[in-house]
C-alpha cells in the first residue's frame, strides 16, 4: 500500500500530534450528507447482525458522523480524489450502491 504524507494544515506553524488512541471507524456505506450553517456532516453506516436474536439478519447501523467546515470538506474531497487516482481507481466511477450525482 502506498502511503502519502498528511494533507498540510492551513496554519503550518501548528504542530501535528498523532494520537495513537483516537477512535477508528469501519464504514461499509455512506448513509447521507447534510449541510447546515457551513458544516458538512457525513453519516456513515456498516452492516451488523444482532446475534442475541434467533435468526439474526443484517441491519444497516449508523456507526458515526463526521462534521467539518466547508473548506475542510473540500480538502477531503480533493485529497480522496488525488489518493484514489494515484492508486489507479477512478474516483468518479462508483462501484457500490451509492452513485455520484
Image: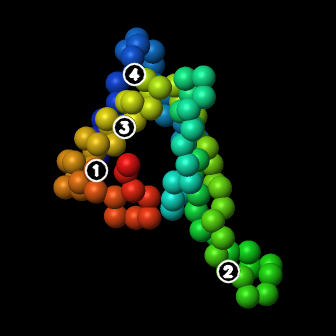
Q: Earlier in the sequence, mark 3 or mark 4?
A: 4
Q: Quickly name the residue at label 3.
A: 77
- The picture places residue 6, in percent across and down from the top left corner, at 35, 33
**Alpha-carbon distance for marks 1 and 2?**
32 Å
Q: Nearer the viewer, residue 99 or 87?
A: 99
Q: Quickly name the residue at label 4.
A: 9
Q: Quickly name the residue at label 2.
A: 57
**Alpha-carbon distance for marks 3 and 4?**
15 Å
Q: Earlier in the sequence, mark 1 or mark 2?
A: 2
Q: Is residue 69 left or right of residue 96?
A: right
Q: Nearer the viewer, residue 96 or 79?
A: 96
- Name the secondary structure under disc 1: loop
Q: Residues within 10 Å of mark 1 (few under 14, many from 20)?
A: some
Query: Does 46 appear above or below 84?
Result: below
**Alpha-carbon distance for marks 1 and 3?**
10 Å
Q: Residues within 10 Å of mark 2 (few under 14, many from 20)?
A: few
Question: CB of mark 1 within 8 Å of CB of mark 3?
Answer: no
The residue at the point 55 percent across, 23 percent down is: 38
Q: Quickly name the residue at label 1.
A: 91
Q: Residues within 10 Å of mark 4 (few under 14, many from 20)?
A: few
- Name the secondary structure under disc 2: loop
Q: Residues within 10 Å of mark 3 (few under 14, many from 20)?
A: few
The residue at the point 29 percent across, 42 percent down is: 81
**Alpha-carbon distance for marks 3 and 2?**
34 Å
Question: CB of mark 1 within 8 Å of CB of mark 2?
Answer: no
- The picture places residue 12, in percent across and down from the top left corner, at 37, 15
The residue at the point 37 percent across, 30 percent down is: 75
The residue at the point 45 percent across, 19 percent down is: 15
Amino acid at each position: 500500500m502506498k502511503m502519502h504524507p498528511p494533507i498540510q494544515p492551513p496554519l503550518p506553524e501548528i504542530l501535528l500530534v498523532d494520537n495513537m488512541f483516537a477512535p477508528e471507524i469501519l464504514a461499509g456505506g455512506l448513509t447521507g450528507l447534510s449541510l447546515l450553517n457551513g458544516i458538512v456532516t457525513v453519516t456513515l453506516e456498516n452492516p451488523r447482525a444482532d446475534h442475541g436474536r434467533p435468526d439474526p439478519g443484517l441491519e444497516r447501523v449508523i456507526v458515526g458522523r463526521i462534521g467539518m467546515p466547508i473548506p475542510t470538506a473540500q480538502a477531503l474531497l480533493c485529497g480522496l480524489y488525488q489518493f484514489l487516482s494515484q492508486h489507479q481507481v477512478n474516483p468518479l466511477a462508483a462501484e457500490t450502491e451509492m452513485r455520484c450525482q
